[in-house]
Image (cartoon, helix red, strand yellow):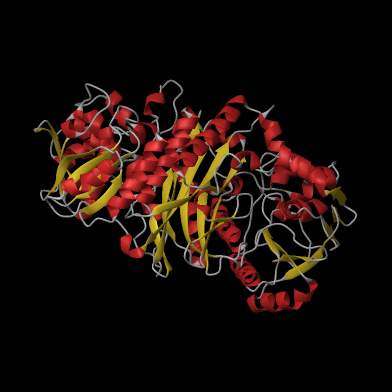
């Protein structure tokens, strides 16, 4: 064998893939060329197992300004000459090894994807998964990741406005750290990742190149963990202060007509950045690695091309205007070096002091083999739930509610978001802790609502329905503010796709997500796939994370979670009774926390979901309702408690319950939103709900200092607050 198995393993290439490279190239590649293939044919860069499935996401929408997957991030037109750029991306494996730097550089990378398109980053969100905080390592990872997110985000001056975190043994060996960034730009200022015409120059800007992150894309993000491998060298180290300067310098450079294209150096570093730009332009490239500034001596061309050192950008400049562009970066005290040029031969040629060290057709590097799993394979799923055999809990309803409010998956996230600067840039209207964040677009009346959502338990039990629910919940969070969901970004976190049952999970989840996205007319405009999330042979729950963008034309006409006024009616949209047969308990937090099982089959009626959200938006925009909050984790009782806690006022619920009280209070049936309103406006609510054909139920009134639910429970809001507010911090303190 011309190349050792050890070398192929280092690049996460199979023997069959190596033979395909030799056949397509017509010769054996040298070590540098093989490194280029290893990076660009990696799962992280090449999407070998997911690209065929991602085609299920339709890209037909008048708002789209770039085709999904064609650029660093997705772009949607929001009117009046403004566009939003957004994307979510994973940094799971690096964060499992070095949580602070893994999370920090995840933030830095997603921010570069946004300003590479000429957009100013205006918001960060995150979606996190860890093992239970009772585990010492999970606690260490959680604290390190939160610290890394805050440490980097706060320094670069981009507000962290929302997100979610869940804890489960499923993630004990493989946490998930998904970072989302949103940017804003004028539509005529959009920049592309393109090399343009032959003769254009390739300029490397920012930090010097080191040995950190080599094999990050191929060796770390494209295979499962192995206990015996030392992975720390593959984790990069970030410098947020340099990134802040890089943001401002690149945004200034983007306004110059001397700049043809901009691309960040993320996964696979200079290799991916340069080859993707050339591929987008249908061109070739020539790079002399000796011209790339280095912070370590003795670096080989292989190391320079594959390094994932942070805070670096590739700027494509028109010939003869390099000094003009360099002066912009000089102004910001950033180094810039012309390291190559665009060619017309279609080759990626790598030189070292003028001597050729490797040359490979660009089209081969960007055309990895694609794999489809067994179409007849059944997805790995959890057990069904026999509701009839499930006993009512020995705990009282009050005890169950307090346990749920104190659980790690429901308790207040204030411990997390108080570490984030969520008001820098002074755009934040709805602060963290609500269903979705809301930001103003300065100079307009527009508002942008942002949310992330995903429930791994649901997808484990039924990946198709779980995928639909992930989209529906993210959109529902946005709709509860009054904003219309218009676009989605996703991060698909799954196990080893080479296992048929895992591939089937991913296929069914994407199918469900694609269907829901079509129903909401909110296309998936960007995203990331993170596979091989396994440790010790066990896959994580299939966890598609969805980031939703909503728009409102009147940012002042919005709703928040908390009850506002004594005497207001409390109304449940989406139901006309509290009858429950127990099926809503499937996959619920109640079922796992109280009964110790993850079982059942979640369900959703997309027609009802779309209609309920449309009615909620109409109620908010017309000023009929004073608050709106979706029913999700913990069910109706937890949603009521959260409304009371956010408003500092109680409620008396009088609607009768038929069937199981645990299912009525704590079942997690979809398509339900709690609203409060003056009794004088009930006729308006009735008219709007009738127009959308949705049921509703008046369940009680905002009243007093207690949360009371018939004869089942009566708890002071102050007691609920003490439990809800302190439980996460107490868990961290042991």
Q: Is residue 729 left or right of residue 36?
A: right
The residue located at (17%, 42%) in the rendering is 24
The residue located at (55%, 69%) in the rendering is 554
Q: Residue furthest right?
A: 711
For the C terminus, give its image quadrant.
Answer: top right
For the N terminus, give its image quadrant.
Answer: top left
Q: Is residue 185 above or below residue 397?
A: below
Q: Is residue 11 left or right of residue 535?
A: left
Q: Is residue 210 left or right of residue 711?
A: left
Q: Quadrant of residue 556?
A: bottom right
**Image spot of residue 300 (x, y percent):** 21, 26
**Image spot of residue 96 (x, y percent):** 49, 31
Residue 348 seen in render: no
**Image spot of residue 326 (x, y percent):** 21, 44
Residue 416 seen in render: yes
**Image spot of residue 523 (x, y percent):** 45, 62
Q: Is residue 662 above or below residue 702?
A: above
Q: Is residue 233 left or right of residue 416?
A: left
Q: Residue furthest left?
A: 355
Q: Is residue 454 above or below residue 147?
A: below
Q: Quadrant of residue 693?
A: bottom right
* Count of residue discs: 0
């Amino acid at each position: 064998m011309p190349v050792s198995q050890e070398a192929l393993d280092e690049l996460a290439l199979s023997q069959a893939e190596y033979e395909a490279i030799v056949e397509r190239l017509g010769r054996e590649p040298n070590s540098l060329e093989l490194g280029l293939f290893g990076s660009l044919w990696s799962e992280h860069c090449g999407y070998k197992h997911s690209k065929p499935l991602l085609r299920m996401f339709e890209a037909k929408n008048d708002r789209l300004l770039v085709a999904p997957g064609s650029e660093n991030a997705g772009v949607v037109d929001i009117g009046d000459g403004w566009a939003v750029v957004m994307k979510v991306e994973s940094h799971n494996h690096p964060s499992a090894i070095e949580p602070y730097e893994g999370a920090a550089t995840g933030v830095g990378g997603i921010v570069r994807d946004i300003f590479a398109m000429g957009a100013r980053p205006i918001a960060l969100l995150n979606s996190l998964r860890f093992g239970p905080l009772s585990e010492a390592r999970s606690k260490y990872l959680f604290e390190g990741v939160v610290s890394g997110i805050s440490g980097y985000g706060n320094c670069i001056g981009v507000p962290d406005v929302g997100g979610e975190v869940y804890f489960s043994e499923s993630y004990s060996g493989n946490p998930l750290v998904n970072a989302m960034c949103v940017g804003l730009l004028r539509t005529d200022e959009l920049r592309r990742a393109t090399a343009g015409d032959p003769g254009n120059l390739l300029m490397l800007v920012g930090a010097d190149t080191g040995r950190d992150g080599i094999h990050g894309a191929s060796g770390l993000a494209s295979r499962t963990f192995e206990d015996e491998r030392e992975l720390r060298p593959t984790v990069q180290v970030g410098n947020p202060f340099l990134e802040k300067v890089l943001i401002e310098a690149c945004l200034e450079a983007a306004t110059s007509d001397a700049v043809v294209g901009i691309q960040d150096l993320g996964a696979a570093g200079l290799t991916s950045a340069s080859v993707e730009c050339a591929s987008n332009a249908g061109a070739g490239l020539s790079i002399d690695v000796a011209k790339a500034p280095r912070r370590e001596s003795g670096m080989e061309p292989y190391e320079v091309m594959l390094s994932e050192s942070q805070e670096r950008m590739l700027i494509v400049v028109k010939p003869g205007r390099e000094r003009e562009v360099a002066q912009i970066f000089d102004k910001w005290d950033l180094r810039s070096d012309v390291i190559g040029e665009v060619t017309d031969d279609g080759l990626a040629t790598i030189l070292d002091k003028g001597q050729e060290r490797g040359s490979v057709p660009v089209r081969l590097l960007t055309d990895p083999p694609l794999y489809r799993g067994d179409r007849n394979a059944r997805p790995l799923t959890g057990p069904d739930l026999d509701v009839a055999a499930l006993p009512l809990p020995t705990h009282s309803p009050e005890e169950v509610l307090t346990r749920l409010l104190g659980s790690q998956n429901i308790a207040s996230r204030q411990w997390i978001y108080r570490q984030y600067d969520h008001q820098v840039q002074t755009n934040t209207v709805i602060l963290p802790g609500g269903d979705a964040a809301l930001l103003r677009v300065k100079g307009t009346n527009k508002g942008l609502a942002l949310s992330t959502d995903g429930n791994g338990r649901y997808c484990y039990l039924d990946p198709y329905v779980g995928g639909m629910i992930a989209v529906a919940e993210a959109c529902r969070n946005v709709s509860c503010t009054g904003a219309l969901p218009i676009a989605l970004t996703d991060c698909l976190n799954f196990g080893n796709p080479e296992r048929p049952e895992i591939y089937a999970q991913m296929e069914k989840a994407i199918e469900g997500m694609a269907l829901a996205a079509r129903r909401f007319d909110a296309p998936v405009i960007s995203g990331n796939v993170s596979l091989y999330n396994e440790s010790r042979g066990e896959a994580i729950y299939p966890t598609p994370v969805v980031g939703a963008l909503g728009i409102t034309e009147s940012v002042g006409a919005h709703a928040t979670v908390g009850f506002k006024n004594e005497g207001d009616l409390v109304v449940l949209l989406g139901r006309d009774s509290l009858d429950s047969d127990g099926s809503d308990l499937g996959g619920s937090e109640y079922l796992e926390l109280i009964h110790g099982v993850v079982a059942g089959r979640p369900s959703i009626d997309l027609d009802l979901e779309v209609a309920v959200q449309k009615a909620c938006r109409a109620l908010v925009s017309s000023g009929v309702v004073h608050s709106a909050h979706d029913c999700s984790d913990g069910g109706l009782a937890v949603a009521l408690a959260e409304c009371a806690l956010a408003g500092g006022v109680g409620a008396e619920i009088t609607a009768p319950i038929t069937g199981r009280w645990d299912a009525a209070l704590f079942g997690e049936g979809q398509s339900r939103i709690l609203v409060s309103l003056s009794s004088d406006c009930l006729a308006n609510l009735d008219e709007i709900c009738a127009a959308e054909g949705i049921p509703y139920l008046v369940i009680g009134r905002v009243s007093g200092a207690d949360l009371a639910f018939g004869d089942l429970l009566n708890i002071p809001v102050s007691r609920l607050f003490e439990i809800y507010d302190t439980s996460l911090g107490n868990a961290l303190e042991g």
